[in-house]
Image (cartoon, helix red, strand yellow):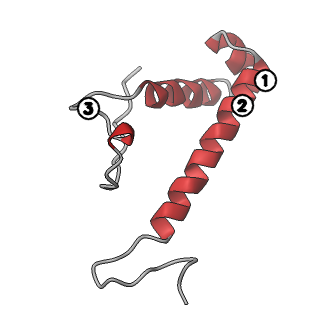
Amino acid sequence: MALPTPPQHSATGDDRSQPRGDGLRLRDIERAAVERTLALTGNNRSEAARILCISRPTLLRKLKAYRAADAVETTRDSTSTYDDGNKRGSDRQ
């Protein structure tokens, strides 16, 4: 299995969200493993959890956390300030 490409983050000043050098964060590697295993099992969560050696409830918690992180990223992207200084997205008036 090929390692996932590190996600590109905006410069927010939060060094904890930035991978160091060319390194990948463990959570990104874990997410790639979970997503690939789900794809290989046809989204059979019980089978994926068995292959990953985690409980089904743990897998479901991870999937819920991934959805929440995606929602935050989507919200952040839709309300970012553009070069012209205007905001776009849900904060627009």
- The x and y percentages for residue 11 are 30, 55
> Residue type at mark 2?
Arg
Distance CA(mark 3)–CA(mark 1): 32 Å
**The disc label shown at residue 57, or none:** 1
Q: In the figure, residue 17 lies in which quadrant?
A: top left
Give whichever of discs 3 and 1 has the lower sequence position. 3
Q: From what the image shows, is residue 90 above or below residue 64?
A: below
In the picture, the disc for residue 20 is 3
Callout 3–callout 1 Cβ contact below 8 Å = no
Mark 2 to mark 1 CA distance (whole Å): 6 Å
Q: Nearer the viewer, mark 3 or mark 2?
A: 3
What is the secondary structure assignment of the residue under circle 2?
helix
Residue at left offset 31%, top offset 51%: 13
For this rendering, which residue is in front, 48 or 23? 23
Q: Is residue 43 visible?
A: no
| In the image, residue 83 above or below residue 75 | below
Task: Say which amino acid is labelled 1.
Answer: Pro
The quarter of the displayed image where residue 45 is located: top right
* Mark 2 vs 1: CB contact within 8 A: yes
Image quarter (top left, top right, bottom left or bottom right) of the N terminus: top left
What is the three-letter code of the residue carrying label 3?
Arg
Q: Which mark is residue 61?
A: 2
Check residue 70 in the rendering and tell me which mark sits there, or answer none: none
In the rendered image, residue 8, in percent from the top left (x then y), is placed at 33, 48
Describe the element under mark 3 as helix, strand or loop: loop
Q: Is residue 16 left or right of residue 78?
A: left
Real-space Cα separation, disc 3 to disc 2, in angstroms = 27 Å
- The reply to whether residue 91 is in sight is yes
Q: Quadrant of the C terminus?
A: bottom right
Using the image as rendered, state which of residue 26 and residue 52 is in the foreground.
Answer: 26
**x then y, percent, for residue 80:** 42, 70
Please state the total of marks drawn on the protein image.
Answer: 3
